[in-house]
Amino acid sequence: MTSKQVKPPAGAVRTAAGAVRPVSGVRMTGGLLHDWRRRNSTATIPHTIEQLRAAGNVANLSRLLEPDPAPYRGRYPFLDTDLYKTLEGLAYDLGDGVAAEPVREFYEEVVGLLERVQAPDGYLNSFFQDPAAAKKPWEDPGWGHELYNLGHLIQAAVAAHRRMGDDRLLRVAVRFADLVVSRFGEAGVCGHPEVEMALVELYRETGERGYLTQAARFVDRRGTGALRHTIFSGDYFQDHLPFRELPSVTGHAVRMGYLAAGAADVLLETGDPSLAGALERLWDDMVATKLYITGGLGSRHSDEAIGDRYELPSERAYSETCAAIAVMQWAWRMFLATGGAKYVDVFERVLHNAYAVGLSAEGTAFFYDNPLQRRPDHEQRSGAESGGEPLRRAWFGCPCCPPNIVRWMAQLADYVAAERDGAVLVAAYTTARIEASELGLAMETGYPWDGDVRLTVERAPREPYELVLRVPGWARDVTVTVNGEPPEAAARDGWITLRRAWSAGDEVRLSLPMPVRAHGSHPYLDATRGAVALARGPLVYCVEQQDSPVPVDDLVLGVADIVNANIERRDGTVVLRVAAGAARPPSAELYPELPLEETSPRVEVTATFTPYFLWGNRGPQAMRVWVRTPATNGKKAT
């Protein structure tokens, strides 16, 4: 048992240098995000528990209690993290009272095992604690993932303490963290960032400043020669230059996102201006040159890497689901640090597209990588029988994404609102009740399917107070009323600020019109030159072969087609019915000579575009986000 005193569960965390702080008292009561949370509880969590048992993650712990342990099951030394991520998600469901009894039984079983198998010095890792393991603890910092394991353990422990008032897992995490601070206080770093943001969170929960100091040290040691590189070069690990000197996000996408999120956590507590400058510069460069239109990060299957600026191929997009979560973690921390709406805009884009697509409609199958195009002859290469296999998989040999989805889906309410002294900021729109320090709100909306938002004051502060509403970057012609009348409002930098003496029953109406939008791409982005993508509100749309009368590769969209698209409801989802064109059959030559005359008239067809996050639920057929535009005189439209 550690000698440190663990504080009782806390409410909203107030950071030392943040511009705003999250509102912890948010409860979603309806809408798409609420439906996702409920699906997570009823389908994804039970499925994940079943898969964790079948894959041997639980047995990897329990075998350590035997005098002659069975062999470790699994290929990777970080499979304990799949349990930790799941426990983090369970803490939200258990704390909110929505978990079924088997979920509580699993939680109790795993927490009990962790308490029993932890080594006397605090070390905990079921791979390296095996006497027959090929490597010893701390032997391979580049690939051992031991600090990465600790990071996810800490995050699960903090969630259990805050949401459930259960300090058992926190005590386990503190013992391991104390060992790490003792061992790595003066030297060393992990090959996979993650522990940095967890240590900052542990500092917030316990008040022990040594954890914050250690997190800052880990950020500062990257690029200083503290890590021995094997298999890949230093840029894969973001270890070829000091963090503050990185010219652009680089290397393994998940590692990059986690490192930046950890650095942003350090910024939130220290206010370090050099970190602030580096983080904003890296963020802006990423958004301008390396982020998919869906918010996905990572263009290369090789090394699961980010790639060069403007290297964003659609069919080879890796865009790992874990990288989407990493970008959201970074985005939210930057919002807390600065109050900037641009970070929430990207957060929302990732949430509704690059992240949401990683889970099937029924909640029990997953994407690991998330391409923006699937060709009709694409092979799964999975050993499936000749009848084919659904695109989404029930589990993976490296199953980092499914439990990551579980934990993130469980905590969506934590990313709805923020506050500062004298103000509440509504960052995300969903049907919910918001209980901030001085203001209580009921929010009703059909977002993201429509942009009408109604907020009713249920608890009013005594003094004049600011209600600050985010205006998404895509929104135009926005209107707002208070009790039916246009208010005096300040609109600036993506926010509308309403300052007044509020009374219970006051009603704010926000209208965010959602016409269909056409997006092109930067001229340096060769992969999508001469193509257009459709979006509406925060949602990116795609066309699947099931919804096109001609091959999706032959569809052609012009400006008039997009302007005249019909918005329709289908099974609770907004789809776009577009009167498009079908290009004439292409030449059989791979590189034909271009004609100089006008192209022949197109054939008119109608295709249905559905939200990108829903693709791949109806079988493995072709799909495109980016669709061809008309060509004139042999030249592609720009």
Image: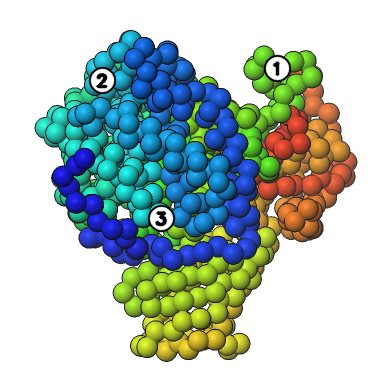
Element at label 2: loop
Q: Which residue is mark 1?
A: 384
CA gap between label 2 and label 3 equals 32 Å
Q: Residue at x 76, y 36 (%)?
A: 618
- Counting from the top left corner in percent of width and height, residue 35 is at 63, 55
Q: Nearer the viewer, mark 2 or mark 3?
A: 3
Q: Amino acid at mark 2?
A: Pro
- Mark 1–mark 2 Cα distance, whole angstroms, equals 38 Å
State the residue lying farthest toward the front. 67
Q: Residues within 10 Å of mark 2 (few under 14, many from 20)?
A: some
Say if 281 sits above or below 305 in the image.
Answer: below
| Amino acid at pointer 3 | Arg
**Circle 3: element type:** helix
Query: x, y percentage for residue 376?
Result: 75, 26
Residue that carries the numbered disc 3 in the rendered image: 163
The answer to whether 479 appears left or right of 232 in the picture is: right
